[in-house]
Image (spheres, coloured by chain):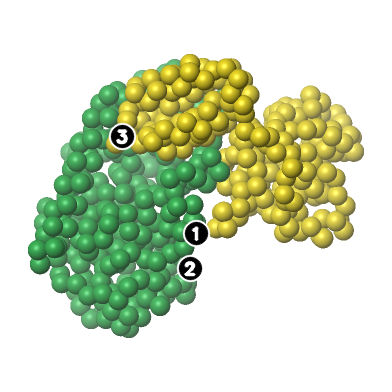
Chain colours: A yellow, B green
Amino acid sequence: MRFEPLGDQAVMAYADDEIGAAGFAARVRRAAPAWAIDVVQAYASVAVFYELAQIDFFHARHLLTELVERESHGSPLLAQRRHVIPCFYELGLDLERIASHTGLENEAIIRLHADAVYTVYAIGFCPGFPYLGYLAEQLANVPRLRSPRLKVEAGSVGLTGRQTGIYTEARPGGWNIVGRTPLELVNVADNYFPLRTGDEVRFERVDARKFEKLRGRRLPLAD
Amino acid sequence: MSLVVFDPGLASRVVDFGRPQSRSLGVPVGVAADRSSLALGNALLGNPPEAPALEICLKGPIVRAEVPVAAVLFGAPFSISSSRQPLEMGTTFALQTGEEIHFGSTRTGLRAYLCVTGGFACPEILGSRSALECVTVGATLSCQTASIRRRFCPSLHGAASALAAGLRLNDGLWLRVTAGLQASWFNEREFFDQEFTVTPALDRMGVRLQARPLTMPERELISEPVGPGTVQVTRDGQCIVLGMDGQTIGGYPKIAQVIQTDWDALGQLRPGDRLRFQSVTLEEAGELYQKRQAWLREWVTRLRVSLAGI
């Protein structure tokens, strides 16, 4: 674990891998030191935001180092929840583009995307947007669009590099759109954030009828 | 019913001190872009520093009072007018039922805060009353019925607090930064030795700057957490400074971090402004922050005490 300053507002912790980062984030949240405002994980990094009026980087780093040393063994992670998210792949605007980059047929792209089990490695970009990893090798490394779309519809499922993700709200965006989920996956005003870092996500292919039927629904309670 | 919005202006929205713990949900903090101006405006009315106010930006709204309202506009020196009385930025005023006020534009700075006695009553979302969207035509901003005598803050009168804090020096505007997490990927001389121009691509999410492009590293970053004040360098070698509604995770390399002391000044940057960056250490950033907080606390206390004395 390496600690670096994110300016004068947070300690950035770099772990060896995503699991290490998740464990560290869980430990800090559990310890809940009074000076720590927020804990944000993205892949193998975790930012611990602090209240500068109460503590500075050097002191915060010291306390986090102690926390890691004290609890480096056998700390259980947050319970991992599993979600199945319906996806209508016929709304995959960039299937052709993905096909030309990967050399795969559309059906093979859809099968590979829907067959994998993903982990939520970060929530960010826009409210509730899950960064999911990792794509099957054959689907990886499709670059972002040369020029981002001005508006990607809410529910759009995109991919780029080794990641896939869901535009929970309409936004400009440059990921390759592979399909769309009918579900509402965030509602800030209603404090609805069903996906959390560390959760497991799988996509389930649905047809147009089911897409219409599920439109605007929310995720069933995860097990 | 309290204030009705006839014209929303360019980007007016209700803000307070923001959401404390929303970053891990991908929701930005949403704090007022110039917190000091919000706190000082509120202090003039006897409100707590974080009472929700309407942040106005570049071109202000037109609103009508449905009940008597006590208010003040504080921040950048916007023009402000009513058919019934002369009004001035930084001086409290009482609105009568039916009175309409026009907020114009500002020659310097970008934002100001329309504070009302008791603050605007808005729904609380994730621990804050900052709105997720700008106000629209016909919106109603609820607040208490109140009246007030004319008062203003002598040495801050008519000036944005960011300006009052002495950040706008004779030789131009400087923002102080600590090293970004990927500063070593760049030739920092290129960054510190030139002047940047603020482009019109500017909102609460971030400010896009224009300068000679920086030499880009041949490396890719895995997305990691970012925060307000993060200076990202996009593929074209240009810089974006993230604002108070900036994204929570970013994949562009970070060359610098604007220190918290200068966030108010960051919130007052307007298109065409020219600025330079000055490097400070984390220790200096900490000291500057304590000083700035002490300065703000002192003014807030003085204003509230003098109000109690009336």
Type of the residue with mark 1: Glu
Calculate the distance from the C-alpha at mark 2 to the C-alpha at mark 1: 9 Å
Type of the residue with mark 3: Gln
Type of the residue with mark 2: Thr
- Name the residue: 58% across, 23% down: A75
- SS for tag 3? loop
Does residue A54 lie above or below B86 as drawn? above
Q: Closer to the camera, B125 or B216?
A: B125
Q: Closer to the camera, B86 or A65?
A: A65
Residue that carries the numbered disc 1 in the rendered image: B133
Does residue B20 lie above or below A2 as drawn? below
Residue B99 visible in the current orientation: no
Does residue B151 lie above or below A55 as drawn? below
Does residue B223 lie above or below A94 as drawn? above
> Picture coordinates of residue A220 (x, y %)?
74, 51
Residue that carries the numbered disc 3 in the rendered image: A54
Cβ atoms under marks 3 and 1 closer than 8 Å? no
Q: Closer to the camera, B12 or B310?
A: B310
- Name the residue: 72% across, 45% down: A222
> Picture coordinates of residue A152 (x, y %)?
67, 49
- SS for tag 1? loop
Do the residues at discs 3 and 2 belong to one chain?
A: no
Cβ atoms under marks 3 and 2 closer than 8 Å? no
Cβ atoms under marks 2 and 1 closer than 8 Å? yes
Residue that carries the numbered disc 2 in the rendered image: B136
**Foreground tag (3 vs 2):** 3
Do the residues at discs 3 and 1 belong to one chain?
A: no
Do the residues at discs 2 and 1 belong to one chain?
A: yes
